[in-house]
Image: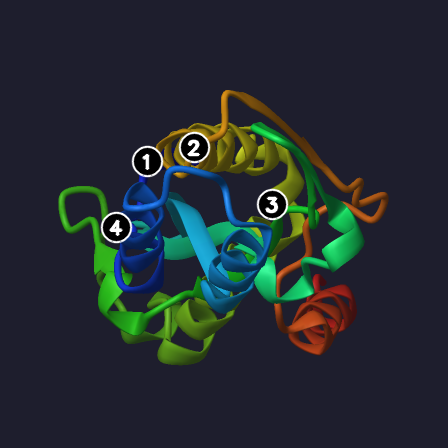
Amino acid sequence: MKLLFHNIGISGLLSAMLIASSCSQQPDRALVISKLKNSAKLATVEYIVTKVISAKDKNWFAKDAYFFAETEAVIKAGIDLEKLKEDDIKIDGRKISIKLPAVEIINFSYPAEGFKVIEKYSDESAIFKWNSIDVGEKDDLYRQGEADIRANINDLGIIKTAQENTRILLKRILAISGFDEIYIEFADNPQGLETQDKQLLKDLKEYFSKNKN
């Protein structure tokens, strides 16, 4: 799998928090908590995962048929600040300690428009129609690509990158809010990251388990 990622811009409520806080000489606990929680889902990283899928239809009497395609999954990860509890924020003068919720997948998409046949290496129809790779087989390949990406999502380094981006962003905002000492930690997620549609992943695994032969 090929992996690309970029930071997601912060807008709306977080910008309002920065502006409002910069006008205050002393950190305001109620304002900090309110603005953090009202920021809702803070997406801090977006990954674009590209996976190549392929198939070969062997023909003993003529040219084999090959199919290669690229697929893309877009994964957004970050912190859901609606889960932030008042006890997770400790303020002592200009010192603040925050325990943030665990990083989670905010959105996972596997759009059809991200599918691209690699024509240079694909010979889908071969010579005879009976050994061509049909639509059903291609659909299975695309579903297998999605299942593989979902199943390996914890190996992409998403948690570490999202934590680093969140820490940098919040330290900047809290420093402007008037805090001199800022400590940020994250809750553990022993289950690791999970895509939003757990049932879909389960169904995909069961489907390919039954049809692998």
Task: Pick the residue in front: 133 or 116.
Answer: 116
Q: Amino acid at mark 4?
A: Ile
Element type at marker 3?
A: helix
> Pointer 3: residues within 10 angstroms few (<14), some, or many (20+)?
some
Whether tag 4 and tag 2 are in contact, CB under 8 A, the answer is no
Instruction: Please indicate, yes or no, whether residue 160 appears anywhere in the rendered image.
Output: yes
Among the 4 quarters of the image, the one containing residue 16: bottom left
Picture residue at 85% right of the left edge, 43% below the top? 190
Q: Please give the residue where the numbered disc 1 appears in the rendered image.
A: 4
**Which residue is depicted at the point 70% across and 62% down?**
212
Q: Residues within 10 Å of mark 4 (few under 14, many from 20)?
A: some
Residue under label 2, please give it. 178
The amino acid type of the residue labelled 2 equals Gly
Q: Which residue is mark 4?
A: 19
Can you tell which mark lies on residue 132?
none
Q: CA distance from mark 3 to mark 4?
A: 36 Å
Which badge, 1 or 4, comes first in the chain's sequence?
1
Q: Residue furthest right?
A: 190
Circle nearer the viewer, 3 or 4: 4
Q: Which residue is mark 3?
A: 153
Locate residue 21 relative to residue 88 in the image: left or right.
left
**Is 67 placed above or below 92 here?**
below
Under circle 2, the secondary element is loop
Mark 3 and mark 4 in contact? Answer it, CB < 8 Å.
no
Of the two numbered discs 3 and 4 on the same chain, state the one appearing first in sequence. Answer: 4
Dot 1: element: strand
Asked whether 10 or 201 is in front, the reply is 10
Q: CA distance from mark 1 to mark 4?
A: 32 Å
- Tell me whether the residue at label 2 lies in contact with that at label 1, contact meaning CB atoms closer than 8 angstroms: no
The C terminus lies in which quarter of the figure?
bottom right
C-alpha separation, residue under disc 2 versus residue under disc 1: 35 Å
Image position, residue 175 (x, y; %) = 41, 29
